[in-house]
Amino acid sequence: MNKNLLTLADCAPASTAEPMARAKAEDISALLKAVADPTRLQILALIAKADLQESCACDLTGPLGLSQPTISHHLKKLAEVELVKKQRRGTWIWYSLNKARWSQIAQLFA
Amino acid sequence: MNKNLLTLADCAPASTAEPMARAKAEDISALLKAVADPTRLQILALIAKADLQESCACDLTGPLGLSQPTISHHLKKLAEVELVKKQRRGTWIWYSLNKARWSQIAQLFA
DNA sequence: GCTATAAATAGACAACCATCTATAAACCAA
DNA sequence: TTGGTTTATAGATGGTTGTCTATTTATAGC
């Protein structure tokens, strides 16, 4: 995933009718798609508000009423775009927000 | 579309395991889904960089290499979540960015 | 009215995605 | 090694979505 995101203005054409590079648009799109799901938004909010700002997957199935594989699927999507970090401690895997990545999204819309 | 968006932190549970309200998550998701498409990102960038910051649909088909109905479809999606404003002047319809709505997204990730 | 141009709609189709059940893999403790 | 717990993977399924062609609607000028 390309981390060097650009503001829309930066990507826009100078004066010709040349659009934002497709590859760049797809990079940004992939990141935004990961957030643009109601369940994943709920997951992110739960992690952010948890003690020490981290949760294990098993803490999420109950409140969200979803199966364990579904939660696992969503966490994988979030990790793929580096919106969450995962850390194994024994049997559990603890997920936390990647705040730098989070801020990159804010910058896109600044 | 609900304009009273909340930061993730605001939506998160107090101390119970109660997640962000589903309806709220779906509202935010709908807004983000509209932006989370590479073609629509390109459209937004084109509009933002156009003279007077507005474009008609016919100006977009060429640079993006897509059919007129496809462009029309995307512009409709963007208008549904109020990310673009449309104004008819004669035969043409001019699209411009809704900057207030744009900023609301930035606030979500602030 | 007739014609030309711009935009929207309808319908079809392929690709993607969120969810489930069933199963496997990883890890810890006896 | 056996058993228990947590997470990941495989496969299936129904719903969503981006794109197209064909058609219709809206507007302007003659």
Image: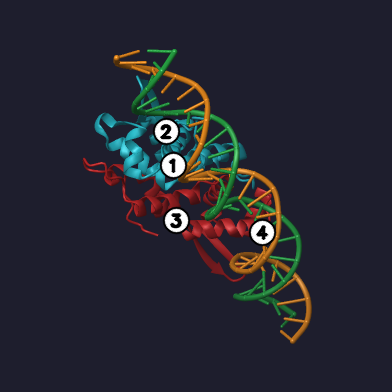
Chain colours: A red, B cyan, C green, D orange
Residue B35, by quadrant, is top left
The amino acid type found where label 1 is placed reads Val
Please tell me whether residue A109 is drawn above or below residue A34 in the rendered image: above
Query: Badge 4 is on which residue?
Result: A68
Mark on residue B83? Answer: 2
Please tell me whether residue B50 is drawn above or below residue C27 in the rendered image: above
Pair 2/3: label in front = 2
The amino acid type found where label 2 is placed reads Leu
The residue under the point 22% across, 43% down is A14
Q: Are marks 1 and 2 in contact (CB under 8 Å)?
A: yes
The residue under the point 45% across, 48% down is A32
Query: Badge 1 is on which residue?
Result: B35
Which element type, helix, strand or loop, lies under badge 1?
helix
Pair 3/4: label in front = 4
Separation of residues labelled 3 and 4 (CA atoms): 22 Å
- Discs 1, 3: same chain: no
Which element type, helix, strand or loop, lies under badge 4?
helix
Mark on residue A98? Answer: 3
